[in-house]
Amino acid sequence: MANVKVIQAKQEAVDVITSKFRESATTVVADYRGLNVAQVTELRKQLREAGIEFQVLKNSLLRRATAAAELTELDEVLTGPTAVAFSTEDVVAPAKILNDFAKKNDALKLKGAVVEGRVVGEDEIKALAELPSREGLLSMLLSVLQAPVRNFALAVKAVAEKEEQGA
């Protein structure tokens, strides 16, 4: 009877992980081996503040969940101690936070990720991490949109000043 309960509990865990894979905009897989408790606590704090769920999960459960979510390409990085960051809202935030933390702490290694349903490697995670935040991209877009109007206003002002000097 205990075996049935254990199997049922594991299946429920796999179902939860599978739904997280499907609902997440970005899921980043990392090896946390070598981080001390204080470092892991700091990393969890940074991720929590950004609305990202961070869990240490068994590779066997993760493999079952990736099979159910049709993300089996991720299985090759599911070796050794594995921590997973799930972000349902921001695509860039988990990659940025984990990459920045890995730069300061050599023990944290990025293994792979699922970005909007597509499995990517470590290089693509780092490229994603280098992108500006959503707010940064929006401010860049706004300045690009404002530039023609600003230039037109300066040209009109220059013409008006020139006419005043001529009069």
Image (cartoon, rainbow, N blue to C red):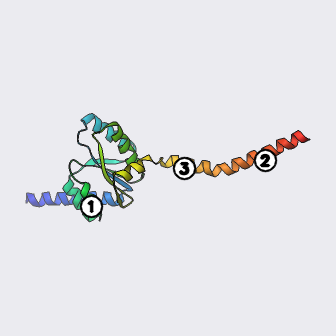
Q: With respect to residue 128, does 44 lie above or below?
A: above
Q: Position of residue 166 (x, y in %)?
A: 90, 41
Extreme residue in the left direction = 1
Q: Position of residue 87 (x, y in %)?
A: 37, 52
Badge 2 element: helix
The residue wearing badge 3 is 138
Circle nearer the N terminus (2, 1): 1
The residue wearing badge 2 is 156
Q: Is residue 83 visible?
A: yes
Q: Residue at x 39, y 56 (%)?
A: 25
Amino acid type shown at disc 2: Val
In the picture provided, is 98 more to the left or to the right than 6? right
Q: Position of residue 7 (x, y in %)?
A: 14, 60
Amino acid type shown at disc 3: Leu
Q: Position of residue 93 (x, y in %)?
A: 41, 47
- Count of marks, rendered view: 3
The residue wearing badge 1 is 66
The N terminus lies in quadrant: bottom left
Q: Residue at x 27, y 34 (%)?
A: 38
Which one is nearer the viewer's eye here, 16 or 160? 160
Q: Which mark is residue 11?
A: none
